[in-house]
């Protein structure tokens, strides 16, 4: 039995999702004539209380499109030092938009209005790049699936309004946060100018992300998506998976969260583990005692058919997901509890 806990991106469609995809009514989405894509876009826009939405092949493309919408070459965006848009999108911020990043040392990938305020460049000081955009991430990837407090986001929104800044959310795992907090997605729709939402992680779709925003911003996004090569033809087969996931897969995220917490509780009681970051959703980040080698530990687990990821600098990551079953879970818990790790 192979247990892949490297990421929730390894999820695969269920037979029911595949059936929904097979039965999809499709057209040419480049001409906006695919009914299944149009349906999903409207579905997500309404869910978040936004005017419009656009379907994309990937979350990286939605984030990069949003950055290009809100900035010009030579501008600056503010984000946490752990932000996905800075660390894991191939340098696209500079390559695609000619924008620099002002990085903040936040707490588990989360930054505050006070920290942001201290980083905004004076607009009339032409020696510095113009600060034009703030990017948040919820849940935080490198921050271990941490969830933003919307009270803090409200403060950030107020600051952005005062300073004339746009506010974008990388909501790749926002679905996880919403299941924990029980908040109405429209709360997020009211706080952000644009939101990127991923369907190929916890929701189990094979491909796809959606960008929501105003009609004007989504019109701009349509052109940028074309420039990036993101226009797809009969994309309704993929969009149908997203519509199915919204109906049937959101609640199952709670099972991923429960299992992550149980793994965390076990790790906290193992003598070879130094620290486990607090677990709020489906990501566990932990470190071993200083005299132990992380690569050896990852290899040792791999030999037992359990795959996890090393993040570097002593950190290890486990991500639970819908294809991680209860049988897998019991095997992982038993294996970890019996492991002997030596320097």
Image (cartoon, rainbow, N blue to C red):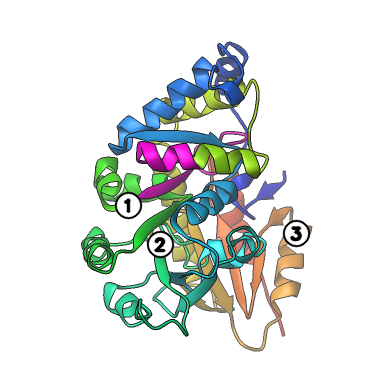
Between 155 and 276, which is closer to the camera in this rendering?
Answer: 155
Mark 3 neighbour class, 10 Å CA radius: few under 14, some 14 to 19, many 20 or more = some
Q: Nearer the viewer, mark 2 or mark 1?
A: 1
**Which residue is labeled 2 in the image?**
136
CB atoms of marks 3 and 2 within 8 Å: no
Is 207 contained in the magenta span? Answer: yes
The residue under label 3 is: 302
Q: Disc 2 vs disc 1: Cβ atoms closer than 8 Å? A: yes
Question: Residue placed farthest to the bottom in the image?
Answer: 291
Query: What range of the chain is rendered magenta?
Result: 192-220
Viewer-side label of 3, 2: 2
Is residue 269 within the magenta segment? Answer: no
The spot of residue 265 in percent (x, y) is: 44, 64
Badge 3 marks a residue whose secondary structure is helix
Gap in angstroms between the C-alphas marked 2 and 1: 10 Å
* Residue 293, x across and y down, in percent: 71, 80
Relative image position of residue 202 (x, y in whole percent): 50, 43
Q: Which class describes the residues within 10 Å of circle 2: few (<14), some (14-19), or many (20+)?
A: many
Q: Nearer the viewer, residue 207 or 169?
A: 169
Whether residue 39 is situated above or below residue 168 in the rendered picture: above
């Amino acid at each position: 039995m192979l247990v892949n806990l490297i990421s929730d991106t390894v999820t695969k469609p269920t037979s029911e999702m595949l059936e929904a995809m097979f039965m999809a009514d499709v057209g040419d989405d480049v001409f906006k004539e695919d009914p299944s894509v149009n349906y999903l876009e409207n579905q997500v826009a309404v869910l978040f209380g936004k005017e419009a939405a656009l379907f994309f092949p990937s979350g990286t493309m939605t984030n990069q499109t949003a950055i290009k919408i809100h900035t010009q070459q030579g501008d600056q965006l503010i984000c946490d030092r752990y932000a996905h848009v800075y660390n894991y999108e191939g340098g696209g911020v500079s390559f695609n938009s000619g924008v620099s990043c002002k990085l903040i040392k936040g707490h588990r990938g989360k930054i505050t209005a006070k920290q942001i305020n201290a980083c905004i460049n004076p607009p009339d000081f032409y020696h510095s790049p113009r600060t034009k955009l703030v990017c948040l991430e919820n849940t935080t990837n490198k921050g271990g699936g941490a969830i933003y407090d919307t009270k803090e986001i409200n403060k950030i929104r107020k600051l952005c309004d005062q300073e004339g800044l746009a506010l974008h959310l990388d909501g790749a795992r926002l679905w996880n946060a919403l299941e924990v907090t029980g908040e109405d997605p429209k709360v997020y729709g009211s706080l952000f100018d644009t939101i990127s939402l991923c369907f190929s992680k916890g929701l189990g779709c094979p491909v796809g992300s959606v960008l929501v925003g105003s009609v004007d911003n989504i019109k701009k996004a349509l052109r940028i998506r074309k420039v990036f090569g993101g226009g797809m033809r009969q994309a309704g087969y993929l969009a149908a998976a997203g519509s199915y996931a919204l109906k049937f897969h959101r609640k199952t995220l709670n099972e991923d969260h429960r299992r992550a917490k149980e793994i965390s509780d076990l790790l906290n009681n193992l003598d070879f583990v130094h620290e486990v970051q607090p677990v709020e959703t489906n990501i566990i980040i932990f470190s071993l005692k200083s005299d132990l080698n992380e690569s050896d530990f990852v290899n040792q687990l791999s030999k037992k058919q359990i795959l996890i990821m090393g993040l570097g600098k002593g950190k290890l990551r486990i991500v639970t997901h819908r294809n991680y079953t209860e049988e897998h879970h019991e095997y992982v818990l038993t294996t970890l509890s019996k492991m002997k790790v030596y320097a």
